[in-house]
Amino acid sequence: LFPSHDSGVVNYGSIFGDNHAIEIDSSYLHTTTTIVNYGEIIGVSGVALKLSGSGTEVNNLSTGLIHSLNANAIEDAYQPSSSITINNYGAIEAATGNAINFSGSGQSVINNYATTDSYFTTGKIVANTASAISLSNGTNVINNYGIIGSNSTAIEIINGINTVNNYDLITSPSVAISLGMDAVINNYGRIGD
């Protein structure tokens, strides 16, 4: 899918993409796009979600799975004016890349909420071999009420102005949080393995 100017996607089924499952057209700088996922969005060789725009919101609900097999699950298009909000109640996972990778100089808010029902315990952002969340630029806020974890680095902060508010669990057997410049950690939960 390739939504462009001021659009929305509501997914109840399965969206697969060999390159990108969903890519927001980065030629429109001032777009508003909302993605609501109840099903699964899978990037096979590439990214599941490639995001851009000045008002992009992703709502991954408790039954939702955003997953990439061979790349980052969610990444931005490196736009200076981007504004991206991720509200995750489900699962965002990457087998070989970062679960979320933001490198643009815009701003982002990542809200990871814990939800439990009779079938799922969700609200997790996880990666197998890379970072669960990697932030290398911009102004970013992470509010974690669920699980952020990786076998490598759970949260990698390289640059930018970053705030991490943890109310539940950030975990890794290697590095839980790698801090670069301008980072504030407010911990009310657990950080560690």
Image: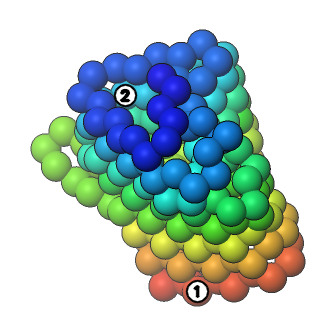
Q: Is residue 120 above or below residue 67?
A: below
Quick one: which residue is furthest to the top in this view?
18
- Number of callouts in the render? 2
Residue 124 appears in view: no
Q: Is residue 147 left or right of residue 74?
A: left
Q: Nearer the viewer, residue 74 or 128?
A: 74
Residue 19 on image: x %, y %: 64, 18
Residue 9 appears in view: yes
The residue shown at (67%, 40%) is: 27
- Report the coloring of the rendering: rainbow
Q: Is residue 153 above or below residue 170?
A: above
Q: Kindly identify which numbered label has been placed on residue 40.
A: 2
Q: What whole-number distance in Å separates the C-alpha atoms at marks 2 and 1?
A: 32 Å
Picture quadrant of residue 104: bottom right
Q: Secondary structure at mark 2?
A: strand
Q: Nearer the viewer, residue 89 or 56?
A: 56
Q: Secondary structure at mark 1?
A: strand
Q: Is residue 81 left or right of residue 111?
A: right
Amino acid at the residue labelled 1: Asn
Picture quadrant of residue 80: bottom right
Near mark 1 (Cα within 10 A), the count class, few <14, some 14-19 or many ≥20, is few
Q: Earlier in the sequence, mark 2 or mark 1?
A: 2
Amino acid at the residue labelled 2: Glu
Residue 43 on image: x %, y %: 56, 23
Residue 187 on image: x %, y %: 55, 83
State the residue position of label 1. 186
Q: Is residue 6 left or right of residue 158?
A: left
The residue shown at (66%, 41%) is: 26
Which label sits in the foreground, 2 or 1? 2
Q: Kindly identify which numbered label has been placed on residue 122.
A: none
Q: Nearer the viewer, residue 59 or 72?
A: 59
Residue 138 on image: x %, y %: 74, 68
